[in-house]
Amino acid sequence: MRALLTRDLMLAFRAGGGFGLGLAFFLIVTVLVPFGVGPNSELLSRIAPGILWLGALLACLLSLDRLLALDWEDGTLDLLATSPLPLEAALSIKALAHWITTGLPLVLAAPVLGILLNLPTPGYTWLVLSLLLGTPALSVIGTFGAALTVGVKRGGLLMSLLVLPLYVPTLIFGAEAARRGATGMDTTTSLLMLAGITAGVIAIMPFASAAALRVNLR
Amino acid sequence: MSLTEDTPTPKRPSGFWSYANPVKFLGLSERILPAFWGLAAVSLIVGLIWGFFFTPDDFRQGSTVKIIYLHVPSALMAINAWFMMLVASLIWIVRRHHVSALAAKAAAPVGVVMTLIALFTGAVWGQPMWGTWWAWDPRLTSFLILFLFYLGYIALWEAIEDPDTAADLTSVLCLVGSVFAVLSRYAVNFWNQGLHQGASLSLDKEENVADVFYIPLLVCIAGFVFLFLALVLYRTGTEIRLRRARALQAREART
């Protein structure tokens, strides 16, 4: 398992493209928003938590089609499926690797981008906390989407259509926690719900992902 | 494919499961389809005419209240169509009956149309009553999300060429999607307060729709249920014949 994790991480770091691309996309989305809604700093600070959550979500989505497609093409997935390691565990590890290479950098970059959007000072802690709790769910759900569409040629757009509705609960509670935090309201409920979703998704989704991948590998 | 071939042939099933045989299914559906079409037509015509012309106007809403005869039944069927797809998908996963998978496939477009009718009539109704075509109300929002789920489900069916793979993957998506649809429903409840009224037909509530509107509404709902059943049976038959035609073509091409 550890070997698989290090392999995935090494590939992401060395092959280039995957690692920095998500961050760059996140930056661009954040920069584009003021062009779209105007430079009014009061407005920006009000929508900043939501924009940052959306940006993180889209950046996460962007890197998903790479998650399994390359391993599918060169046959690694077939080897993984026949290895003694259960496919569920292998996919959990791949989701973890995806989170370390995409989710974690987004969490770390979010406060910096928060400055650009004039995020209110009390919001930073809650933004980072909510992203930290929520992005693992994005990676795990995304792995399911990738497993569903891995056999489809040019499946990227289809995967977005499948994955984005699944992201709704996570986005709602995550953005809600960040928004409440930024306006100084109580965030306990939304953070607990967010953590609950993440925990539940981590526990259950690998089985669905593995089931879908087994069908595709058949 | 291999899964169905590996299992030893069981003794010929009887009762409900015998209709997993496409031939028997087609035979039955051809026999009951005319009845369903007829029942749907009769109850829709009766219900709608009764509702539109022979019920009093609501004292606050005026005649706009009559859109309820399209709005409530279509919304009900939009949710139940997804539920039916969930059951059919489960049957496909557990018992590998092709008819079941095809029924789920056939129900999806009908469900989309029901969702669209509910959203559209809701907008038309909301405009004079709430003063807005659209509000980010939990019910409205979760219906929009349901619509997206339907789109994803249909798109996945369309994208995969091998029919068994497509059936398996869409079934898994339907299961996962159901969980997330319910989750989204509660999430949006938490996220925004509602403009939409509560349930108008629940059995355990004292305040329901007034009786004058209630009975024609029930007739309309029955009409939509029969319409849905007839459409799904018809479309399932089409899918079965389509697959049979493909099989014949493939056999033709081989010789």
Image (cartoon, coloured by chain):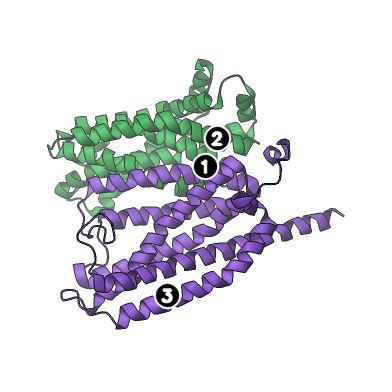
Chain colours: A green, B purple
Mark 1 chain: B
Front residue of this view, candidates A212 and A22: A212
Label 1: few (<14), some (14–19) or many (≥20) C-alpha neighbours in 10 Å: many
Q: Relative to residue A137, is residue B78 depicted above or below?
A: below
x and y percentages locating residue A32 in the rendered image: 31, 48
As shown in the figure, which amino acid type bears the numbered disc 1?
Val
Please name whichever residue, A147 or B122, is drawn nearer the observer in this view of the structure: B122
Labels 1 and 2 within one chain: no
The mark tally for this picture is 3
Q: Amino acid at mark 2?
A: Ala
Residue B207, by quadrant, is bottom left
For residue A150, side relative to residue B143 (left or right): right
Disc 2 versus disc 3: nearer the observer: 3
Q: Are callouts 3 and 1 both on one chain?
A: yes
Q: Dot 1 corresponds to which residue?
A: B172
Which amino acid is tagged 3? Leu
Task: Please say if A163 is above or below A89.
Answer: below
Left or right, B99 with reference to A58: right
Mark 2 and mark 3 residues within 8 Å of each other at the beta carbon: no
Q: Is residue A154 left or right of residue B194?
A: right
Q: Which residue is under mark 3?
A: B44
Q: Regarding mark 2 in the picture, which secondary structure is present there?
A: helix
User: Residue at label 2?
Assistant: A211
Do discs 2 and 3 share a chain? no
| Residue B149 point in image, percent of width and height | 43, 51
Q: Residue at x 63, y 60 (%)?
A: B239
SS assignment at label 3? helix
3D distance between C-alphas at marks 1 and 2: 8 Å
Question: Cβ–Cβ below 8 Å for labels 1 and 2?
Answer: yes
Residue visible at 37% across and 42% down?
A167
Work out whether residue A11 can be spotted. Answer: no
Q: Can you say which quadrant of the picture contains the C terminus of chain B? A: bottom right
